[in-house]
Amino acid sequence: MSQAVFTHDTEVCLVAAAEILNAPAPERLEEIWDYMDRWDWSGERPSEIAELAQVHRVLTRLHAIWLAPLHEAVAKTNKLLRDAAALPQLVHHEPIGWHVHAAAEDSGFATRLAVDTAMAIVDAIRAGAFERLQVCAANDCDDVYVDLSKNRSRKYCDATCGAKAHTAAYRARKARPAN
Ligand SMILES: [Zn+2]
Ligand SMILES: [Zn+2]
């Protein structure tokens, strides 16, 4: 049995946030709808252009937290929660069971995205696992990911970047003159 790194809802939220952050801006709305379907996200879907602009602002802030050193990430996460007037409440609904909603039920998607992801980051920091929020090590890729490997050994956003990096390293070794 492998030990889970995070509680399920935290893991789902962080992985989904990474997917949305990695989606090119024009495809983000589709990525978000897809995300809401996959995880049975309750509440209204973002569709208004005005709300999309808000979503982009939230994503910019989440991206900055992802890349920040721990103490800065803490300050930025707390600010995100304060700005959204987050109020944690235990709720029970499928498919997750008991978990926390910290944004008001009638708040818009951008606020819920900000608060849910901030709460998941709080969880990661409390678990001493903030460094599991990573950026791809490939030279030509800035995608973010969540390292869920047992020994924190993941270096690339996905198998494609991993394979490309391995091929590049192999070619570099072969190109080196033997001596
Ligand atoms: Zn929920
Ligand atoms: Zn990558």
Image: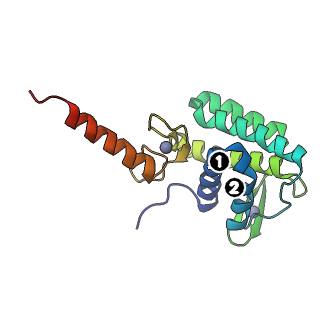
Mark 1 Cβ and ligand 2 under 8 Å apart: no
Query: Residue at 86% across / 60% down in the picture?
Result: 44
**Viewed as shown, does residue 160 lie left or right of 14?**
left
Q: Amino acid at mark 2?
A: Glu
Give the image location of residue 25, x and y in percent.
Answer: 71, 43
Closer to us: 130 or 64: 64
Which percent across, then down, holds residue 156? 45, 45
Q: Which residue is mark 2?
A: 31
Of the pair 165 and 145, the residue shown nearer to us? 165
Q: Vertically, is 30 above or below 135? A: below
Q: Residues within 10 Å of mark 2 (few under 14, many from 20)?
A: some
| Residue at 49% in and 40% down | 136
Location of residue 179 with respect to 170 vertically, above or below: above
Q: Quadrant of ligand 1?
A: bottom right
| Placement of 9 over or under 145, stated as above or below | below
Instruction: From the viewer's perspective, tell me whether residue 128 is left or right of residue 174.
Output: right
Distance between the Cα atoms at labels 2 and 1?
7 Å
How are the colours assigned in the image?
Answer: rainbow
Look at the image and tell me whether residue 87 can be seen. Answer: no
Question: Residue at left 75%, top 70%?
Answer: 93
Q: Residue at x 65, y 49 (%)?
A: 17
Please give the residue where the numbered disc 1 appears in the rendered image: 23
Q: Earlier in the sequence, mark 2 or mark 1?
A: 1
Which image quarter holds the C terminus?
top left
Is any atom of residue 72 visible in this view? Answer: yes
Residues at discs 2 and 1 in contact (Cβ within 8 Å): yes
Q: Residue furthest left?
A: 179
Q: Residues within 10 Å of mark 1 (few under 14, many from 20)?
A: some
Q: Left of 82 or right of it: where is 153? A: left
Q: Position of residue 90 (x, y in %)?
A: 76, 60
Measured from the top left, where is residue 159 in percent x and y?
43, 53
Determine whether the residue tagged by mark 1 lies in a helix, strand or loop: loop
